[in-house]
Structures are given as structure tokens and as C-alpha cells.
Image (cartoon, rainbow, N blue to C red):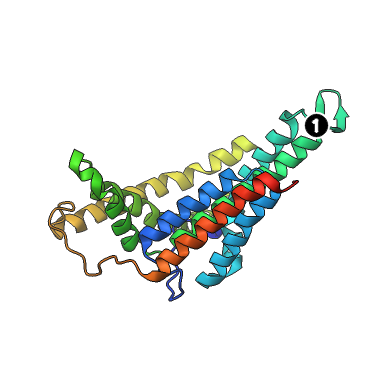
Amino acid sequence: MIKDITIGQFFPGNSIVHRLDPRIKLLLTVIYIVMLFVADTFCALGAGVVFLLISFLLSGIPIKMMLKSVKPIVPIILFTGILNLFFISTGDILFQWKFIRITEDGVRTMIFMATRIILLICGTSLLTYTTSPITLTDAIERILSPLKVIKFPAHEIAMMMTIALRFIPTLIEETDKIMSAQKARGADMETGSILKRAKALIPILIPLFVSAFRRAEELALAMECRCYHGGDGRTRLKQLKTAPRDYAAVAVAILFLAAVIVLNRFSPI
């Protein structure tokens, strides 16, 4: 399960999605999220599915990576589905036993919300799959740069967000190594009661926190040795520039958003 977490990973490539301006990719991600939350019917949500599949095919990222990004959140999807299944009492009753009631609207909402969460995770994961941390930092800083007028620390905020994303795969790899080492010493983390399993995590969490603080200290020391003092006077090797393909991508995303709005009004389901 630990190895299946792909949040924050970057897969280098030369696809059209990789070459898009990172600011445009952030805008496309926002449009995609709006697309999912505006959709009220399955047909409208289907437009989001088509947009996601086209984006993955153009990016060259294997579809199995999309499935791996969903695997860690399966418990959240199940929990959300169960809540919608048992707490929505409108619609025709499909099953009833004592206080437990399953209705047609509950089943529909469960499937709809589970699909929306899966699409949300897959779509937002594509941003980090196709954008390097450094480029993402520059994009966030450029977007937040107008706020510098009110002394908003745009560069520092962008740096912290990107470092957090960058270190997720590192901490996941470190956790996997610690778990393997503890299992080699005879630690049992898969059997017993919930309380016993929770106690078995203590030998993992302590060295993980120690390792995280050590890496943070090493990073701070490296930045200090390189005379890092924020974004003042900082220059960039590669300047962010938009191209015709960026405007075409935004136009396509807006068309899909319009399709979602139209399908909301005219689709039966």
C-alpha cells in the first residue's frame, strides 16, 4: 500500500501536457475541479471522465498510474459511500431492516460521490505527474506575485508548498524502508486487534519523525550555505512563457465545462 502512493511524484516526459505552461496547468486543474463540482448528473460527470482520459492519453502517463493514485484513498471512498448510502432516506426504498434503510437516492448518491472523488484525485495527481517541483514553484509564485503589493510572502508560500509536495515520495520511501526493517526484526503489524496494531506503529513513527526532522535540518543548512534569502533578487534560468497550445488547452477545458452545464440541464440522469 505504501508503494502505491504516487502523490507528489514527477514523471519526466516530452508530451504536450508536459510542455504546457505550469500556470496554465494550474488553471486547467481549477477548471477541472469546478467541472466536477458543477456536475449534477451522471451524463455531466461523464464529460469530466472524457476530459480526464484525453488528458492522460496526451500526457503519456500510463493509465495504471491513475489507478495507483486511487488505491490509497479506497477507505475514504468506502466511508463516504456508506454515509451516503445509509443517511439518505429519500426515494424508493430498496431494502429495509429495522432502522437500516437503503433507498434509490442513497445508492445513486453513493455511486455519484465515489466517482467524483476518484476523478478529483486522478485529475489533480496529473498536475504533479507532469510538472516538476521547481517549475510548479515558479508558477505558484507568479500567480501570487500581485499580492506582493500587500507584503504577502508569495515566494516563501510557493516554496513551502512545493517542498511539501516534493518530500511526500521521500517520506513514503523512508516509511517503507522502516517497515521492512521492523518486519525483519520480527515486528508484527498485520495481525491482532486495532489497539495492538496501533502500538505496533510506534516503532515506525518515531524513526520516521527523526528522519523527517533530520532531512529538514539538512535542507535548511544547504539553503543557508547557498545564501538563500527568499525571492528578492532571484533570477530564473527558464522564463515562463505561454504558447498557442496553452490557449488551445484552456479553450478546450472551457468547452468541456460548458458541456457539463448543458448536460446538467438537459440530460435525464
Tell me what residue is drawn at x 63 percent, y 37 percent: 194
Residue 155 appearing in the image: yes
Q: Does 90 sit left or right of 180 as displayed?
A: right
Tell me: residue 260, above or below residue 13: above
- Residue 191 in view: no
Judging depth in this view, the residue of 183 and 53 nearest the camera is 53
Name which residue lies at 51% across and 62% down: 252
Between 30 and 98, the residue placed more toward the observer is 30
Q: Position of residue 5 (x, y in %)?
A: 53, 56
Query: Which residue corresponds to mark 1?
Result: 91
Viewer-proximal residue among 98 and 115: 115
Q: Quadrant of the N terminus?
A: bottom right
Secondary structure of the residue carrying numbered label 1: loop
Q: Give how far across and how far down residue 187 sits, in percent.
A: 56, 50
Q: Is 240 rendered above or below residue 40?
A: below
Q: How many marks?
A: 1
Q: Residues within 10 Å of mark 1 (few under 14, many from 20)?
A: few
Q: Nearer the viewer, residue 160 or 209?
A: 160
Q: Is residue 58 left or right of residue 97?
A: left
Residue 250, placed above or below residue 14:
above
| Up-down relation of residue 24 to residue 91 (above or below) | below
Question: At 52% from the left edge and 49% from the top edge, which residue is drawn?
Answer: 33
Counting from the top left corner in percent of width and height, residue 126 is at 49, 61
What amino acid is at disc 1? Gly
Q: In this view, which residue lies farthest toward the bottom?
A: 14
